[in-house]
Image (cartoon, rainbow, N blue to C red):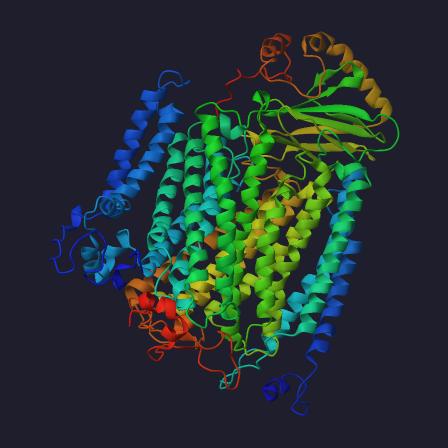
């Protein structure tokens, strides 16, 4: 009954307020404020930061999607709150509501607007994915989105239960437990595993790619600031999954070159014992390497921690 | 009916098959301990397990790499499988079939005598859909509470990044059990109890299409539950509910429990869905045409299609995992010609429809409840039904969004990004329908309505956060973190569980003739709503800040947030305890009877007494109008419960000879 509604806010005189307009006027400032806050206040601090090109892409994707999501969310919430206050049941009113079975114009508008939002999001996501060379996500072994310019720095990431090691094929293929990257250079991560599925996640670089056994998964990034990088495993890989963390470094190009030179010499004896650099490794074929590592007092990849039937899981 | 499979309440003496003369004296009833029930089922399960274990050790004791018989995967798997068969045999699942095959009379007479036998029938292989519904209800609440306790254990460990209540091994086992318990057992949370109980009532049928399949689908769930929990005796399984190979191939015997339990539950889902599809299509009362089908029935129908089409993939994948673990096939071993990607594809090809198996029934329940308490017709009935059908279709084309970073088929990521974002269009229809129904409504804040409103709030957050995950660049940060975890808890815990609670408060007066205490119900709602959001909203931030899922230790900087979440989750547990107290108090102690139509609903199920009489309807009703005609001036009653003799016979002359039974 319209009469019951008319008495809500604007006094007794008016029969039926324009609910649509009121909801719009309530929604507009909420949506505007939310969007401004997201864009200017929250946006620059959104994860994962802007340490690399891929991280910056992800940050801007999250920011732009938040700007699009906030008005939608605000609309539903403002509408819902308005409905619950204005159209709540009053004591003594036992009439049923108006028999509205639907409204084609409203439905078509809704479907049209959501379709436009959704399709534009899909286009936006594709552009963001293709632009900065895959946005730091794992692209399989034949990536179609590559960085322009010459051959990027190759870093092989080898996951195994439960640690990460890194090989640098352009510097003699030495293998180390520390991730070191130069600033301002394109980096190509070649990610593989020796046992189960891991996921290489360099948080500040915005790189995440699964490490599957016998598969090479490529991800690109370009660090733009120096600093520390938290490396974690993002796919449950067994008992010590949570402890599969290391800290990497992004350093200046000269410091990186100095580091590779030192590491190359220091690890020369060990590098000779390693299987030759390939994109994937057969864990059974390199199982005996554990002894070598132990003798050298080093730890590294090569499946040397366990026999082929191990590790026995809990 | 040519083949008599009616529930015992319908059965008349002299009509059961098996060759006995109609006039012959009924066979004497057996004493209770010789009648199949839970106790014989347990005995059958134990005997079956021991037989299977023995068989496994005889077959494979020599050539499998085992230290003792408890580590022989063959023995464990065969034990579980034969134990499950023994459990069913002990229940008497096969006895009637065997008796019919050998031409001996079935024990239907004592079943019929048993129809009003009180509590005892709830522990038997009952063919009455109302008994099965209540069995499902109690079972599902039990499974849910078990999973919830495991969640409390997880949050206890996460109180501190450095002080450990559990070892890493125990923690991983708890995480796996919690995830599998919730994702696998809760798949039939709404369709099991509410679906089996209410579907025949809502479509004007006397029963479900296949009572034996219906009962079987329930009695498989306790078997799956026991098998799954028994995995803890082997130290659990270290791979969560997703069971990614090759970790699941390497893992110890807990993985056998995972694979067998998930497989059993998959079969249960297929049976449940199959039965519901046939019932909806074939057992609607005259006049219940597709345009008058309650929206909850649409949800059941679409969910059932998902179950029937997706669960076989799961059962197949589990079978492959079992053979990989026992007879040394290499489906998932890369260096032997298999692929770890194969498991990921198979699992998520089931796993994503599974997510909608959990979500769609919730859409149905809240959309069903909304018009009753808005006192208005459902806005855009066809849009709502079309949305559910759209979700069902699209859900088979989105599974690779779980694998955006995996390197599978990377060039297809824009396509899966598109399909994933497209599915938010039909999902958004439920908000269109809700907002349209709110328009100029007369909203009554009853307990079911509060839970329904809570559903919409939670699902809004869950849905919007899902859009972030569909975008590959954003997903690269969020994938595999607590962000994902918060997202799907918002859609499942905040969606499915809130909808289940709404449905329970709404329909329990119908199902048991007893009303749940409304004051306790309101306390339950407000505590659950507040502490649910207090628990899971910060987890979005925790995930964005870099905490991966399923970790027993984390960055020290996140300790405050994690503590907040843990304490909120304990309070959420208290809220669930309030619900349990309310449920037990209202149904056992207070027992406030509610026999009529307390919500003044137009639903067909509310037009009969509560609980409904045996056979639901004295006569097959003739449905005269839709279920949501609130406020329509001269709307006819929803159905004629006592149609004049011959109405149906004339309309359905062919079926009348057998069906009407006047």
Identify whether B43 is placed above or below A274.
below
Residue B128 versus residue B606: which sits nearer the camera?
B128
Q: How many labels does the image show?
A: 0
Identify whether A112 is placed above or below B563.
below
Q: Can residue A239 be seen in this view?
A: no
Instruction: Give the residue displayed 85% in from the left and 31% down from the top.
Output: A184
Instruction: Give the residue displayed 58% in from the left and 82% down from the top.
Output: A98
Say which quarter of the image contains residue B391.
bottom right
Instruction: Classify residue A217 as left or right of residue B381.
Output: right
On the image, the x and y values in percent for residue A224 come to 83, 35
Quadrant containing the N terminus of chain A is bottom right
Identify whether B258 is placed above or below B427.
above
Say which quarter of the image contains residue A20.
bottom right
On the image, the x and y values in percent for residue B599 come to 43, 75
Residue B518 versus residue B597: which sits nearer the camera?
B597
On the image, the x and y values in percent for residue A60 come to 78, 47
């Amino acid at each position: 009954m319209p009469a019951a509604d008319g008495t809500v806010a604007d006094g007794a005189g008016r029969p039926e307020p324009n609910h649509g307009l009121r909801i719009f006027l309530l929604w507009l400032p909420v949506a505007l404020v939310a969007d401004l806050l997201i864009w200017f206040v929250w946006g620059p601090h959104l994860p994962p930061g802007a340490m690399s090109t891929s991280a910056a892409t992800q940050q801007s994707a999250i920011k732009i999607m938040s700007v699009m999501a906030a008005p939608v969310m605000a609309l539903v919430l403002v509408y819902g709150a308005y409905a619950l206050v204005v159209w709540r049941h009053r004591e003594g009113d036992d009439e049923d509501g108006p028999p509205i079975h639907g409204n084609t114009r409203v439905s078509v508008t809704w479907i049209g607007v959501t379709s436009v939002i959704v399709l534009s999001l899909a286009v936006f996501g594709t552009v963001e994915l293709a632009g900065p060379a895959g946005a730091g996500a794992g692209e399989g072994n034949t990536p179609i989105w590559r960085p322009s310019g010459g051959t990027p720095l190759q870093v092989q990431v080898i996951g195994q239960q439960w640690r990460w090691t890194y090989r640098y094929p352009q510097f003699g293929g030495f293998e180390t437990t520390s991730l070191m990257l130069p600033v301002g250079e394109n980096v190509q991560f070649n990610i593989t595993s020796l046992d189960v599925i891991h996921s290489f996640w360099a948080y500040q670089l915005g790189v995440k790619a699964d490490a599957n056994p016998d598969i090479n998964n490529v991800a690109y990034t370009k660090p733009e600031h120096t600093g520390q990088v938290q490396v974690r495993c993002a796919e449950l890989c067994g008992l010590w999954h949570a402890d599969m963390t290391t800290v990497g470094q992004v350093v200046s190009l000269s410091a990186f070159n100095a580091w590779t030179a030192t590491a190359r010499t220091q690890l020369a004896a060990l590098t000779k014992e390693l299987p030759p650099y390939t994109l994937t490794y057969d864990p059974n074929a390199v199982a005996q390497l554990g002894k070598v590592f132990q003798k050298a007092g080093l730890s590294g990849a090569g499946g040397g921690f366990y026999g082929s039937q191990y590790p026995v899981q809990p | 009916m040519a083949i008599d499979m009616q529930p015992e309440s319908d059965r008349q003496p002299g009509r059961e098959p098996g060759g006995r003369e109609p006039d012959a004296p009924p066979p004497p009833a057996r004493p209770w301990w010789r009648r199949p029930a839970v106790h014989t089922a347990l005995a059958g399960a134990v005997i079956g397990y021991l037989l299977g274990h023995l068989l496994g050790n005889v077959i494979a004791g020599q050539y499998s790499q085992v230290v003792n018989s408890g580590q022989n995967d063959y023995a464990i798997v065969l034990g579980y499988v034969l134990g499950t068969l023994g459990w069913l045999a002990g229940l008497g699942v096969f006895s009637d079939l065997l008796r019919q095959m050998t031409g001996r009379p079935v024990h239907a007479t004592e079943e019929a005598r048993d129809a009003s036998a009180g509590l005892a029938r709830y522990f038997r292989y009952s063919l009455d859909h109302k008994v099965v519904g209540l069995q499902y209800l109690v079972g599902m609440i039990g499974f849910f509470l078990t999973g919830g306790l495991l969640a409390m254990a997880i949050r206890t460990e996460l109180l501190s990044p450095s002080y450990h209540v559990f070892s890493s091994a125990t923690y991983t086992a708890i995480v796996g059990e919690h995830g599998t318990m919730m994702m696998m057992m809760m798949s039939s949370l709404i369709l099991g109890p509410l679906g089996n109980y209410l579907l025949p009532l809502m479509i004007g049928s006397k029963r479900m299409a296949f009572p034996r399949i219906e009962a079987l689908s329930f009695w498989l769930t306790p078997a799956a539950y026991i098998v799954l929990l028994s995995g803890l005796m082997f130290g659990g399984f270290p791979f969560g509910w997703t069971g990614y190979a090759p970790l699941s191939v390497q893992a110890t015997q807990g993985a056998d429990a995972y694979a067998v339990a998930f497989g059993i539950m998959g079969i249960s889902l297929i049976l449940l869905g199959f039965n519901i599809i046939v019932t909806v299509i074939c057992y609607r009362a005259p006049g219940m045409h597709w345009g008058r089908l309650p929206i909850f029935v649409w949800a059941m129908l679409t969910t059932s299609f998902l179950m029937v089409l997706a669960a076989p993939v799961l059962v197949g994948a589990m079978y492959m995992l079992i053979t990989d673990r026992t007879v040394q096939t290499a489906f998932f071993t890369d260096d032997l010609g298999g692929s770890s990607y194969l498991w990921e594809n198979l699992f998520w090809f089931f796993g994503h429809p599974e997510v909608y198996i959990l979500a769609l029934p919730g859409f149905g329940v809240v959309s069903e409840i909304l018009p009753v308490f808005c006192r208005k017709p459902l806005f855009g009935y066809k849009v709502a039904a079309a949305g559910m059908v759209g979700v069902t279709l699209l859900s088979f084309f989105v599974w690779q969004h779980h694998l955006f970073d995996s390197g599978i088929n990377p060039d297809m990521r824009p396509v899966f990004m598109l399909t994933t974002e497209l599915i938010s269009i039909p999902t958004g229809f439920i908000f269109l329908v809700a907002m349209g129904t709110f328009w100029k409504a007369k909203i009554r804040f009853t307990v079911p309505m509060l839970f329904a409103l809570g559903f919409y709030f939670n699902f809004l957050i869950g849905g919007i956060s899902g859009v972030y995950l569909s975008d590959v660049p954003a997903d690269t940060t969020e994938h595999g973190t607590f962000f994902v975890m918060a997202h799907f808890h918002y859609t499942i815990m905040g969606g499915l569980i809130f909808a289940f609670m709404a449905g329970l408060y709404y329909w329990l007066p119908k199902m048991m003739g007893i009303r749940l205490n409304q004051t306790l119900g309101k306390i339950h709602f407000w505590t659950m709503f507040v502490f649910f959001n207090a628990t899971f909203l910060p987890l979005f931030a925790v995930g964005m800040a870099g905490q991966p899922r399923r970790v027993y230790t984390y960055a020290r900087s996140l300790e405050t947030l994690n503590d907040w979440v843990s304490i909120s989750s304990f309070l959420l547990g208290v809220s669930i305890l309030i619900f349990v107290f309310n449920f037990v108090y209202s149904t056992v102690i207070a027992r406030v009877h509610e026999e009529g139509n307390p919500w003044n609903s137009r639903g067909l199920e509310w037009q009969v007494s509560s609980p409904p009489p045996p056979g639901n309807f004295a006569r097959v009703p003739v449905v005269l109008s839709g279920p949501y005609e609130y406020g329509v001036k001269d709307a006819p009653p929803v159905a004629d419960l006592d149609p004049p003799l011959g109405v149906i016979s004339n309309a359905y002359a062919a079926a009348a000879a057998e069906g009407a039974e006047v």
